[in-house]
Amino acid sequence: MGSVQSFETPKSRGGRPGKIDAPLNKKLSEVKWGEYRLGDLFEVNSYTKRFDANKVIVLEDGKYPYVVRMSNNNGQKGYIDEDEIYLNEGNTISFGQDTATMFYQERPYFTGDKIKILKAKFREFDKSNAQFFLTTMAKSFESFSWGRSSFSVDIIEKQIISLPVKGGTIDFDFISSFIAELEAERIKELEAERIKELEAHLTVTGLKDYILTEEEHSVLDSYEDWEWNTFNLEDLFGKSTRGKRLKSADRIPGELPFVTAGEADEGISDFIGNDVAIFSENTTTIDMFGSAKYRNYKYGGDDHVAVVHTETLHQLASIFVTSAIHKSSHSGQFDYSKNFYAKDADALNIQLPSRGGRPDYECMATFISAVQKIVIKDVVLFADRKIGMAKEIVNK
């Protein structure tokens, strides 16, 4: 009989990394163990045909995987389209002879060089218990290192592995229940991580606060009674700035968003490293079609973009102003035959709420804040319900 001090899933030979929880380790310490020759449990077969990685076309997607001596991605380099008569059976273990990398392959697959196919001699072997066999096999081969002489079939067959036993035979019921509990623990860990990330995201972005303040209620209730006035864009924010043309062929890859005309990706056509004029965050762009967009990040722009300098405003007020600009500039009068330019931005008149004949930016900011809360309320409540349900499951 063998003994197992701890059970750790292999990091480089087919399993999930990390040790399991103490309660499961306790179960492992209490179970009876038996030692088995690998050759008594598995046929160690050669591949049907070796496919040289340098002579095949490896695809990112396909019907049948191409398994090589990799230590990750389940040993799969990709997919290849070859004659199906050379497929190796599924529900087997692929074993790299000079790497001791081993993976369960559920589906039929093609192989590269120095791969042995381990086919179980017992009918109970399947996806649900394969991970247990892989783990105990990896522990048996753990003294082996990459680049050492290849394992021959004889050495593989004589390798000893430890397995739970009951009544003198392999305890498959224990293995199945253990793997099921192990999977459940892993799901709980992942769910707990997801909950933590979601809660942090809602907090950092301020999206957890959806309760309207008295001021926000007041602004919404008085909307019909707002005083509106017409204001000239240049009078409010000074002359608009025009970007400078930068051909696609001249763009150097980098991290600065480069804004051009268009609706796709908010008009960001590229990320560049060129030495160009950088426009401030909290500004508004108007493209050649008169489409206005708020920018809360630094960016560059081409000559089809006019920049309105709203950066001194509160962020929420800038968003309101952008909406007012878009309503005035994007009314169908600008297209490929008649472009919108910076001079058109300077001449543009927009409607804004006012107080004492001046733009009421405080009112605008409060209004946008209220609208954001109304929009996110259902999303946050849904997220809270999901988090609550997940916590109940995780804490069971």
Image (cartoon, rainbow, N blue to C red):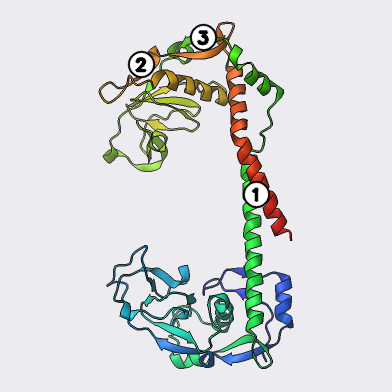
Residue at the image position 55 percent from the left and 21 percent from the top: 313
Q: CB under 8 Å between callouts 2 and 3?
A: no
Query: Does residue 344 appear in this view?
Result: yes
Q: Earlier in the sequence, mark 2 or mark 3?
A: 3
Kindly report the distance in space between the C-alpha atoms of the residues bearing marks 3 and 1: 45 Å
Q: Name the residue type under label 2.
A: Asp
| Residue 153: x %, y % from top left | 44, 91
Q: Quadrant of the N terminus?
A: bottom right
Q: In this rendering, would 138 be left or right of 386?
A: left
Kindly report the distance in space between the C-alpha atoms of the residues bearing marks 2 and 1: 49 Å
Q: Is residue 392 above or below residue 114?
A: above
Mark 3 element type:
strand
Provide the residue designation for mark 2: 344
Q: CB under 8 Å between callouts 2 and 1?
A: no
| Residue 161: x %, y % from top left | 58, 87
Disc 2 crowd rating (10 Å Cα; few below 14, some 14-19, many 20+) is some
